[in-house]
Image (tube, grey):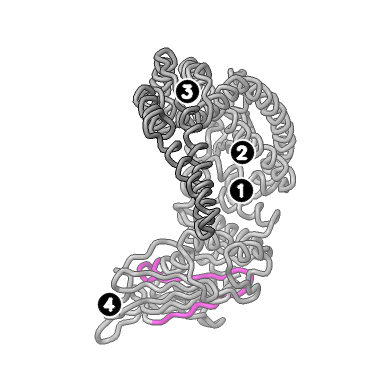
Amino acid sequence: MLQFLTIENYALIDHLEFHPGQGLTVITGETGAGKSIIMGALGLILGQRADAKAVRSGASKCIIEAQFDISAYALEGFFDQNDLEYDASATIIRREIYATGKSRAFVNDTPVQLPLLRELGSHLIDIHSQHQNLLLGQDAFQLSVVDALAHNQAEYASYRAAYDQLKTQDSKLKTLKAQAEHDAQEADYLRFQFSQLDEANLVEGEQVELEAEHDLLGNAEDIKASLSIMYDDLEGEDLAVVQVLKDVTQRAHELSRIYPDIAEIAQRLESDYIDLKDIASEVFRRSEDIIYDPMRLEQIEDRLSLLLSLQKKHGKTSVEELIQLRDKLFERIQHIDGSNEEILELEQEVRKLTAQATQRAAILTDTRKRAAQQLQKDLIARVTYLGMPNLRFQVSITPLHSTPSDSSTPSNSSNPSNSSHLSPTGSDRIEFLFSANKNQPLRPAGEVASGGEISRLMLGIKSLVASARTLPTIIFDEIDTGVSGDIADRMGSVMKELSRHLQVITITHLPQVAGKGNQHFRVFKADTDTQTITHIEQLTSEQRIQEIARMLSGSDITPEALANARTLITE
């Protein structure tokens, strides 16, 4: 419920405070007095975009602030989800619009973005104007009315859970099929690549070993020649180093008998002789091992050529990288080969989910059909009371993707989900059909109803919905335009009845409606020496009589108008 609205420096408003109460609050005023300005400021609180031109001339910024009692709206989860302080009895929304064009919004002093403010505002106030009458022809609005009267929140939640799960799996299936189709087109190429790498019998570390062996075989003759020379120098026939060292060692031992000081040198020479003798043997063995094998060299060169060719083809730098690529190709091919089985399993699951969602949609449809029958009966009664005695009204419920005259279910498609008959709201297309005259066939309400007829239809619908669930504050912005007399009085009675369930604020030019209010405010303009300012005031009982009399007779208030005004207020 809106507890108060404060506006500062907005358009023609210097400072304005509006404190509507419970029940029916009436706002009246002459044309051009500024009622639309107040509605524009209220729209900013609900998240509408701001225009810097709305800042009052000479002011740096305008401030619009509203306080709400939201205890009946079950919004704790919304506030928690968006990290907002929750105050059920006094939630404050503030907008600040700067002359520079900058705008800021706050909920309980926490800065928020406009999309969040619009979402919150939709739970707080429903501004119903003549423009909103266009909603009557919109499928979403018609569906929401039927669902509100059907009390089918549990059935809808059950269906929506099944539908969301279906859409998730159906999306996975489509993605998998698209990938499988793409993979199938390149499967042969992938297999060719894998075959090349697999047939190469790649071994980690192989390339390094082959390159070392290639260097050895390529220089085998030079290596063998050098080793032979080394062996001849060490242990050949002419001045061989080993033989010379042997002779020196024997002489040192002989000398040590008569010259003990050289015994240590003799031992060292003997050790060197043994090492050098062993080295000579190793050189000889290695010389014997070196064999020049041109056939083996050619085999190595062919193998290295293959490895380098594969590396170049696949953009790799080693055999190890080729092995990794081979393994990835194998996994990819395995996935492609197994995708058909995965697709079949997912198709089966999607069919199961489609059947489940379809079943729950049918339950949802049943709740709507029952509510539609009651809506037809109750709305005809209410709108007939508002001066449309020949009204015929019908709620048409047909399957999606069909016309109202075609209730058949769409034929199956190749899609295994076969869920084209389902939508986020169920499987129904709902349309309000209307006829105001006996000789007029039923036609879509948004196409054939006049402005006054639509106003009465919408008022009847709002009153029915309000009795079925908790609604936010409703503001009727001159929706009674086009009616008068007894019908105007009856529209006021319906608004009065509606206000028993929720807070109703109505901006009206009709004295019959104004007389029904629990509280009455008047909007007016006053001139100063430098500017014109819009004001709003709550009227006393006597002021109400004067205002309603003015609405009846104009600026020249007659005794008859005053008497009539008293009658309207006391009814």
Q: Amino acid at mark 4?
A: Ser
Q: Is residue 206 left or right of residue 347?
A: left
Magenta span has 21? yes
Secondary structure, mark 2, is: strand
According to the picture, the residue beneath numbered tag 4 turns out to be 57
The kind of residue on which mark 1 rests is Val
Q: Residues within 10 Å of mark 4 (few under 14, many from 20)?
A: some
Is residue 480 in view from this perspective?
no
N-terminal of the pair, mark 3 or mark 4, is 4
Residue at horizontal 42%, vertical 39%? 244
Q: Position of residue 214 (x, y in %)?
A: 40, 25
Return the disc, 3 or 1, that comes first in the chain's sequence.
3
Which residues make up the magenta segment? 15-37
- Residue 173, located in which quarter of the rendered image? top right
Real-space Cα distance between discs 2 and 3? 113 Å
Q: CA distance from mark 1 to mark 4?
A: 46 Å
Quickly name the residue at label 1. Answer: 383
User: Are the residues flagged by discs 1 and 4 in contact, CB closer than 8 Å?
Assistant: no
Q: Nearer the viewer, mark 2 or mark 4?
A: 4
Q: Amino acid at mark 2?
A: Phe
Q: Residue at x 63, y 72 (%)?
A: 86
Real-space CA distance between mark 2 and mark 1, rounded to the nearest whole angstrom:
10 Å
Provide the secondary structure element on which disc 1 rests: helix
Amino acid type at image mark 3: Glu
Location of mark 3 (residue) = 288
Q: Identify the residue under disc 2.
A: 393
Q: Nearer the viewer, residue 93 or 438?
A: 93
Contact check, label 2 and label 1, Cβ < 8 Å: yes
